[in-house]
Image (cartoon, helix red, strand yellow):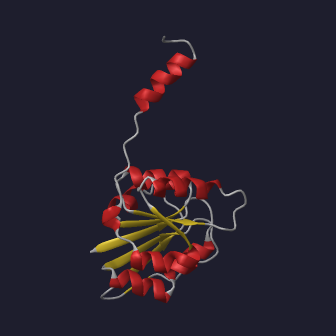
């Protein structure tokens, strides 16, 4: 059973939820072998109707204390471009498609997605190009995101504040 997980974090991104829950998108996901789609819709006003059939299940929720379980079980993560959501998915080694919200002003999220794509860690698109990307992407080309090294940051900070030379 292959599972796709969509997250918008604590925000609302109704356009993404509408797009991914649309019949055409569900058909594409089915054709790619996914039989379950879990939508974390945040504060959005678009609330797709959950359903379950022999071949496909759609689950919907707003918030959970932790997305850890959904991320762990996902074979594909489709996310808004929030730094926390992106890095959490990548650190878990999950294939990631980031969908840019074009309605945000001064879109720093686009810069993050563009850089992580350039480094080969994720694919990115907009709602209008999501379906095409899903059909054309090759997840095997993605590179693993290197784990964080908090000890390096700690040593750097110690130097900056004069605790270490």
Q: Front-most of 91 and 122?
A: 122
Q: Position of residue 149 (x, y in %)?
A: 40, 34
Q: Residue at x 38, y 67 (%)?
A: 76
Task: Choose top left, top right, bottom left or bottom right for residue 2.
Answer: bottom left
Left or right: 72 in relation to 156: left
Which quadrant, please, contains the N terminus? bottom left
Q: Which residue lies furthest to the right in this view?
A: 105
Q: Position of residue 10 (x, y in %)?
A: 59, 59
Q: Where is residue 98 in the image (x, y as percent from the top left)?
A: 50, 64
Q: How many marks?
A: 0
Q: Which residue is drawn at 34% across and 66% down?
A: 139
Whether 65 is drawn above or below 62: the answer is: above
Q: Residue furthest left?
A: 1
Q: Front-most of 109 and 74?
A: 109
Q: Residue furthest front?
A: 118
Left or right: 149 in relation to 43: left
The answer to whether residue 65 of the structure is visible from this angle is no
Q: Front-most of 155 and 51?
A: 155
Q: Residue at x 52, y 17 (%)?
A: 159
């Amino acid at each position: 059973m292959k599972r796709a997980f969509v997250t918008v974090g604590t925000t609302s991104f109704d356009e993404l939820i509408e797009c991914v829950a649309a019949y055409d998108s569900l058909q594409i996901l089915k054709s790619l072998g996914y039989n379950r789609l879990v939508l974390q819709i945040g504060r959005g006003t678009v609330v797709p109707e959950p359903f379950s059939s022999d071949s496909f299940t759609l689950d919907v929720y707003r918030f959970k204390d932790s997305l850890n379980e959904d991320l762990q079980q996902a074979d594909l993560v489709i996310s808004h471009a929030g730094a926390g959501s992106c890095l959490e998915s990548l650190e878990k080694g999950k294939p990631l498609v980031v969908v840019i919200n074009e309605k945000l002003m001064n879109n720093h999220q686009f810069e993050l997605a563009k850089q992580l794509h350039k480094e080969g860690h994720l694919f990115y698109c907009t709602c209008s190009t999501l379906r095409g990307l899903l059909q054309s992407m090759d997840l095997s080309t993605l590179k693993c995101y290197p784990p964080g090294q908090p000890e390096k940051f700690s040593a750097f900070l110690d130097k900056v504040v004069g605790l270490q030379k």
